[in-house]
């Protein structure tokens, strides 16, 4: 019997700015593995594909990250007046249209989504898919669909919105829409972590996910809403997957997608990193997503160095202990400073240790932000200002709605971090530019280690 065909689609991004910081649609590719196991034949169209032969070549930076191809498009109505250019990131629509003409008619289409404020790209993608396959059931899932399911149903008009981790709900939904029953176990832990990398045109780096969710409940973050139970893959399986990927693809870089890679490191990250250091000496590791400072011990720092960590990002968010006590307690200043000392002892340089600082939170003053930057600079690391995006369904959401200058609850485009929607007077792009200049001056100075 031939396997039923299912088309998986990674949509365009519409935004002021987007950068391919090891960004791949891991959620969608994880579903592809499961679908394969359940008897389907998945194919994949990536509107962001940096390796499409018809797209202008993208400049790939050191360590396999790079720019997306982009085209200027009009600023959406609600954002009119924002003095910044707006773009569609990814392939030109004609290229995608042409590719869709060559896709064998699928029994169902799955579209993923990421940032809530990227929904216009999702909508455009769905419109194109409807043109190509008007009769085919189309299901929308992913982060935007999970955080704003009603908005997604009304504005993107899929046949169904599926919120949350897709595996379980998808089996039922596919049966309802196609009459095809999936076999296999949709929640098999083995498959929840295994993106079907072979569906990508080129595997430039390994997107690695070793755990889902996070045991912390920070008020500004949606991780626990998106994945209610923190689950981890056995370290030995992670190592086996890396081995497999290294054997099959020409890769030198690993990008971690975990929210809480280092938590309980003795049983998880340490065995992974120590085995990686022994078995894959040339591999470079990157964590564009923040790591937990409190989990960095001297042994963890050593293991990170030995494994080949190159890009470390720590989620400090604020240097104030009061802030941490009030928002989730994932770290405090003392733990952060110890972590930095251990990382430095292990041989990491300032440039390798970026420290995320949240800026634009409701009620956060300029003084607080300046203090945070100084603390990180003094400690010998690289401050990375991360503009706060208010996220529906998080504990901080109601406060953000109250504090916002623009109606973030009515229009997800206003949740875009670039707009600093909840920042108090004075915390604006000019202020951030001044801070970034100061950071550059200090970190570029010859005395900076
Ligand atoms: C990795 C990651 C990144 C990566 C890149 C991600 C990428 N692929 O492009 C990096 C580090 C670059 C990044 C950056 C940012 N991120 Co981010 N990121 C994440 C993270 C940690 C994981 C996403 C992921 O891949 N998960 C793993 C896969 C397996 O899960 P998944 O995609 O959700 O897929 C599952 C389900 O959703 C579902 N599913 C998915 N697709 C489909 C489709 C169908 C049809 C179905 C049925 C189901 C389904 O099934 C999948 C399997 O279970 C999430 C937090 C989280 N836990 O989700 C934040 C998150 C998405 N990021 C967030 C934010 C705020 C940001 C930044 C704005 C931070 C900042 N201020 O700088 C930037 C902006 C990026 C930009 N402008 O370019 C927010 C979202 C905000 C919002 N308003 O929507 C999140 C939710 C974190 C948070 N703070 O709560 N991010």
Image: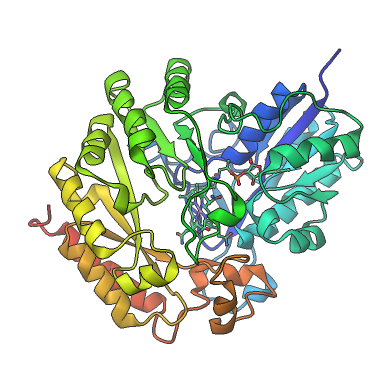
Residue extending furthest toward the bottom: 425
Q: Is residue 401 above or below residue 329?
A: below
* Residue 280: quarter of image: top left
Left or right, 209 with respect to 308, comes to right
The answer, for residue 403, to whether it is visible in the render is yes
Left or right, 292 with respect to 381, comes to right
Colouring chosen for the image of the structure = rainbow
Q: Is residue 286 above or below residue 276?
A: below
Left or right, 8 with respect to 330, comes to right
Residue extending furthest toward the top: 1
Q: Nearer the viewer, residue 399 or 120?
A: 399
Percent position of residue 268, x then y = 39, 34
Q: Nearer the viewer, residue 260 or 157?
A: 260
The N terminus: image quadrant: top right
Q: Report how many numbered discs are placed on residues in the image.
A: 0
Q: Residue at x 86, y 39 (%)?
A: 133
The answer, for residue 62, to whether it is visible in the render is no
Left or right, 255 with respect to 163, comes to left
Q: Nearer the viewer, residue 201 or 157?
A: 157
Residue extending furthest toward the left: 447
Percent position of residue 222, x then y = 55, 59
Percent position of residue 11, x then y = 66, 47
Q: Is residue 443 above or below residue 371?
A: above
Percent position of residue 272, x then y = 36, 29
Q: Residue at x 42, y 49 (%)?
A: 289
Q: Residue at x 72, y 51 (%)?
A: 163
């Amino acid at each position: 019997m031939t396997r039923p065909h299912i088309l998986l689609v990674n949509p365009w991004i519409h935004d002021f700015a987007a950068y391919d910081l090891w960004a791949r649609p891991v959620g969608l590719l994880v579903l592809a593995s499961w679908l394969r196991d359940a008897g389907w034949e998945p194919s994949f169209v990536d509107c962001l594909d940096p390796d499409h032969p018809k797209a202008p070549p993208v400049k790939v930076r050191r360590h396999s990250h790079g720019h997306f191809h982009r085209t200027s498009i009009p600023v959406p109505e609600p954002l009119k007046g924002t003095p910044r250019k707006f773009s569609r990131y990814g392939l030109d629509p004609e290229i995608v249209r042409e590719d869709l003409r060559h896709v064998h008619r699928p029994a169902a289409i799955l579209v993923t989504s990421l940032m809530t404020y990227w929904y216009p790209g999702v909508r455009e993608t769905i419109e194109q898919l409807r043109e190509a396959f008007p009769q085919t059931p189309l299901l929308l899932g992913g982060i935007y669909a999970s955080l704003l399911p009603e908005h997604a149903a009304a504005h993107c008009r899929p046949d169904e919105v599926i919120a949350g981790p897709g595996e379980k709900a998808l089996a039922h939904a596919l049966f309802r829409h196609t009459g095809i029953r999936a076999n296999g176990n949709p929640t098999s832990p083995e498959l929840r972590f295994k993106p079907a990398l072979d569906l990508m045109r080129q595997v430039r780096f390994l997107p690695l996910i070793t755990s889902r969710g996070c045991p912390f409940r920070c008020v500004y973050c949606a991780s626990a809403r998106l994945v209610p139970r923190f689950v981890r893959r056995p370290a030995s399986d992670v190592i086996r997957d890396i081995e497999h990927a290294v054997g099959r693809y020409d890769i030198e870089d690993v990008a971690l997608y975990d929210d809480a890679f280092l938590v309980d490191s003795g049983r998880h990250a340490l065995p992974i990193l120590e085995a990686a250091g022994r078995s894959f000496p040339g591999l470079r590791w990157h964590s564009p997503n923040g790591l937990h400072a409190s989990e960095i011990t001297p042994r963890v720092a050593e293991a990170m160095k030995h494994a080949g960590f190159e890009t470390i990002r720590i989620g400090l968010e604020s240097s104030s202990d009061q802030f941490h006590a009030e928002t989730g307690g994932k770290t405090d200043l003392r733990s952060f400073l110890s972590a930095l000392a251990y990382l430095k002892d292990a041989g990491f340089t300032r440039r390798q240790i970026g420290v995320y600082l949240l800026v634009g939170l409701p009620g956060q003053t300029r003084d607080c932000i300046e203090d945070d930057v100084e603390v990180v600079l003094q400690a010998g690391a690289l401050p990375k200002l991360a503009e706060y995006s208010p996220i529906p369904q998080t504990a901080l959401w109601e406060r953000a709605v109250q504090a916002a200058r623009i109606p973030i609850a009515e229009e997800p485009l206003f949740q875009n971090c670039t707009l600093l929607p909840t920042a108090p007077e004075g915390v604006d792009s000019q202020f951030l530019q001044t801070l970034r200049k100061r950071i550059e001056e200090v970190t570029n100075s010859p005395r900076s280690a």
